[in-house]
Amino acid sequence: MSNANLQFNLTAVTATSKSRSTLFSSSGDHLNRFCTCLPKPVLRPQRRRLGIRATEGWQPPQERNKLQVAALNNVLHYPSKLKIAVVGFGNFGQFLAKAFVRQGHTVLAHSRTDYSSEAHSIGASFFSDPHDLCEQHPDVILLCTSIISTEPVLRSLPIQRLKRNTLFVDVLSVKEFPKNIFLQLLPPHFDILCTHPMFGPESGKDSWNGLPFVFDKVRIGNEGWRAEKFLDIFSTEGCRMVEMKCSEHDRHAAGSQFITHTMGRVLEKLQLETTPINTKGYETLLNLVENTASDSFDLYYGLFMYNKNAMEQLERLDLAFEALKNELFGHLHDKLRKQLFLMKREGSMERPPKLSKLPPNKGKGYALPPPSPPSNSEILQPQNH
C-alpha cells in the first residue's frame, strides 16, 4: 500500500471515531435530560408480615411474674439483687431476713437492741446507728417494728440521707394505720408499699408455699422495679400473692385475725392443760393458745387499737356469748317447767329444785356437781347460800 493510501485510511478512521464519540456524547446528554424529567422513585421500607410466635407455653402467674421481672432487668439494666434495710430486727425481722439472704439479697439490720451476733450468723450486717444505716443507701427500708412503735421509729430515721425513690415497706398486721403514717411523714419522691405476710415464724417455719401475702401499692413512682423485685421474693418462696386495698384488709382482718387472737387469749386465761383423752378439736384449741400466747401483748393491743373494725367485732363477740348463754339457760328453764307441770298433773304439791349458782371448776372436769336424784326432803328443804 502506498503512503498516500495509508494516510487517507488513518484520516478516515480518526474521523469515524470522532463522529461516534460525538454521537454517543450527544445521546448521553439527551438521556440525562430525559431522566431528570422523570419523577424520582420513593423508596419505602419493606414491611414485615405480622404474626404470633409462641416462644413459651402457658405459665402460672408466679412464673409469669418472674419472667416479667427478668425482662425488665434486661431492658433497663437494673441490679438483679436488692439492698434491704430491716428496721426492727426482732423475731419476725430475723425470720424474713433469712429468706432475703437465702435468695442472694444484701441485708442491713438496725434495732434498738444489739442483734449484731444474730445478724452475723445469718449473713447480714448490723448497724446500731440509723445514720450509718441510711448512709449505705439501701433500696428498701423494711419496718418490722411493733404497731405502737411504728411512728416514733419512722420519725427517728434520717431519711434525708436516702436516695430518691427509696421504697418503704411495712409488714404490720393492720394496714390503714401505717399507710396514713407513711403518707404523712414521707416526701412524695419515696415509694410506699404496704404488705402483710399472713404467717409468722411458727406457721411459716417449714415453708411459705401457699401462704397468703397481702400487699397494696400505695405510691409507686416511675422506677417501680424495687417494688416488683421485693414482691418477687415472696412469690419465689411460693406465697399466694393477694393484692388488696388497706381498708379492705383491715375489714377482713378484724373478722379473722383479731377474733383468732381474742379467742386464743381467752382460752389462755382458762389455763387449759393437755389430758390423756385429748380430742382433735381440743388439740386445735391448745395449738391456738400456744400460737397466740407466743406473740406479745403489744401485737394484740395494736390489732385492737389501730383497727377501727376491732371494737365492733369485740362487741359482736360479747353479744354472741350472751346469746349462747341465754339459749343454754332457756333450754334448762324449759326442762324445769315441764317437770313442774308434770308434778301438778300428778297432784303433787312438791316444788321443783331451785337452780343453784355454778360452783367453781376445781379441775374435776365438769362445771356442775355430778347429777343425783334428789329426795323429797331435799327438795322441800330451803337452801342456804
Image (tube, rainbow, N blue to C red):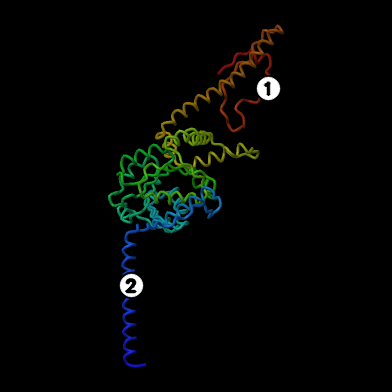
Q: Position of residue 185 (x, y in %)?
A: 30, 42
Q: Position of residue 281 (x, y in %)?
A: 61, 36
> Which residue position is annotated with label 2?
23
The residue lying toward the viewer, choosing from 195 and 330, is: 195
Instruction: Give the residue type that dot 2 points to.
Output: Leu
Q: In which quarter of the image is the C terminus?
A: top right
Q: Distance between the residues labelled 1 and 2?
A: 143 Å
Q: Is any part of residue 112 visible from this angle?
A: no
**Measuring 53% from the left and 41% from the top, which residue is drawn there?**
290
**Residue at disc 1, secondary structure:** loop
Is 327 displayed left or right of 296 in the figure?
Answer: right
Is 248 displayed left or right of 221 in the figure?
Answer: right
**Residue at disc 2, secondary structure:** helix
Of the numbered discs 1 and 2, the one sitting upstream in the chain is 2
The residue lying toward the viewer, choosing from 264 and 382, is: 264
Q: Where is residue 126 in the image (x, y as percent from the top left)?
A: 37, 56
Hey, which residue is sitting farthest right in the picture? 346
What count of labels does the image hold?
A: 2
Tell me if label 1 and label 2 are in contact, CB under 8 Å: no
> Which residue position is annotated with label 1?
372
In this view, the mark in front (1 or 2): 2
Query: Is 330 located above or below residue 349 in the figure?
Result: below
- The image quarter containing residue 370 is top right
Q: In which quarter of the image is the N terminus?
A: bottom left
Q: Is any part of residue 232 visible from this angle?
A: yes
Instruction: Give the residue type that dot 1 points to.
Output: Ser
Query: Is 149 located above or below residue 370 in the figure?
Result: below
Q: Where is residue 161 in the image (x, y as percent from the top left)?
A: 28, 52
Task: Report crowding for label 2: few under 14, some 14 to 19, many 20 or more residues within 10 A (C-alpha).
Answer: few
Query: Is 13 located above or below residue 136 in the figure?
Result: below
**Measuring 37% from the left and 58% from the top, which residue is drawn there?**
41
Query: Is 184 located above or below residue 102 in the figure?
Result: above
